[in-house]
Amino acid sequence: MRPAHTTHLHFLGIGGDGMSGLAKVYSELGFRITGCNLEENRRTQQLRELGVPVTIGHSLTHLQRATHVIVSSAIPPDNIELLEAQRLGLPILHRLELLKDLTTKRFTIGVAGTHGKTTTTAMIATLLERAWLDPTFVIGATSPTLGTHARLGMGKFLVAEVCESDGHFLKIQPQIAVITNIGRDHLNFYGSERALLASFAQFASQSDLCIACADDPGARRAVIEQFPTTLTYSIERPADLVAHDISFHQFHTVFEVSWRGRRVGHVELLHAPGIHNVYNALAALLVGRQLGLSFADMAAYLRDFQLPERRFQVLVNNGITVVDDYAHLPEQIQRNLQAIRQSWHPARIVALFQPHRFTRTYYLGREFSTSFDLADMVVLTDIYPAFERPIPGVDVGLIFDALRRRHSSVAYLPRGEDFAHKLKEFLRPGDFVIGFGAGDLGTELQRFAQAWNQKYHRDSYGT
């Protein structure tokens, strides 16, 4: 790529979490950045505040001074700007090729896996930042602890969340590869679970050191059994780093840590409930140990760590509890419901679910039938398509019918202007309500939370 001062990177879909993070970092590196997005959102507004020009909608005029065009897999092949860039012969780079360019001069920790990537990446970046190592990081959601989702640091480390969804993560060759787990996802791209596992094996082989979860069957098959030098962490199986004596109380999680059979620390996570966050913390601790940080220091750094946005984000806690969560796969949903049962012991859990993508619903739809066993009521809404076109015969009814066969209380609630009002009709005082989905369900829950909190305030204070 040309020197920064002569390079103009134009991002298609700049409002996405991954794209906006890279745009921010490359802007801080001195590159000229522009971008467009189909709609206004928080990311487009943040970039404008940083001085990055962002337009809404697509136009051929956007490419007038661009030297490179940056895309993600969400950009359809018939996008008018993409077609024009091809006609003009402009270099077109996938966003992970841009991330690869960042890795060339930095010691890279790449975090991959089906679940837990965002939180684990944020934890690792927090450890390095609080150890005064000033890392560069690119995370898939804003970390309240770090204050942003991407930043150019002056230190030698790069911590990056690396998504396996379209195979482009194999462009990254990190010094340390972290594989949190490997589940059945993105089968529309890989075609089979075997091909998915093979891609993770290749990712691990491209690193100097791989760190993986010994309790996860996919990680064992693809990585640990194939690469004996892999460093492992676990709760249930023998591993290099093991968590034990775990206890939960609402957001507060406490556990002991042993390194190869010797107790080395006591960890308290004040804002990270659930067994899945113990796993995330173990991965981060193992990375930190390899970089020379002490367990005592790391425990102190993680004590007040706050989960990234839309990761068990509390919106309402008066009369009822309402949580927004990004989980959109069967195991993620199970883990969150388990955390609620373990830590809150509520009288009733109401789970809202917005399926994400038609292809995922096609491949995994019926697997969701067992995900909600710990919920007392399940409310489904329509599929969020992301960039996908509908598939004939694939709709929320696949999940609804499967759930009805084993669950006594299932309802359907379409999204729309009256979503918040109708949701209230399902609820009782004291309910724990959690919304699951990687789409726009969080926006609906924000509206509901605002209305609920206003009503609670009026009823409580008479204003």
Image (spheres, grey):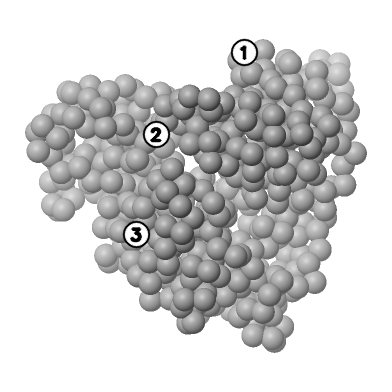
Q: Is residue 255 left or right of residue 149?
A: right
Amino acid on which disc 3 is placed: Leu
Nearer to us of marks 1 and 3 is: 3
Q: Estimate the spatial distance between the alpha carbons at disc 1 and disc 2, rounded to whole Å.
A: 24 Å
Residue tagged 1: 417
Q: Estimate the spatial distance between the alpha carbons at disc 2 and disc 3, rounded to whole Å.
A: 24 Å
Residue at 87% in and 26% down: 428
Viewport quadrant of the C terminus = top right
Residue at 61% in and 80% down: 240
Nearer to us of marks 2 and 3 is: 3
Up-down: is 178 above or below 164? Answer: below
Q: Local crowd at mark 3 within 10 Å, few (<14), some, or many (≥20)?
A: many
Q: Local crowd at mark 1 within 10 Å, few (<14), some, or many (≥20)?
A: few
Q: Estimate the spatial distance between the alpha carbons at disc 1 and disc 3, rounded to whole Å.
A: 42 Å
Circles 2 and 3: CB distance less than 8 Å?
Answer: no
Nearer to us of marks 1 and 2 is: 1
Give coordinates of residue 351: x percent, y percent.
74, 35
Q: Is residue 63 visible?
A: no
Amino acid on which disc 2 is placed: Gly
Residue tagged 3: 170
Up-down: is 176 above or below 59? Answer: below
Residue at 43% in and 35% down: 43
Is label 3 in a helix, a strand or a loop?
Answer: helix
First reached walking from the N terminus: tag 2 or tag 3 = 2
Residue tagged 2: 15
Give coordinates of residue 167: x percent, y percent.
36, 52
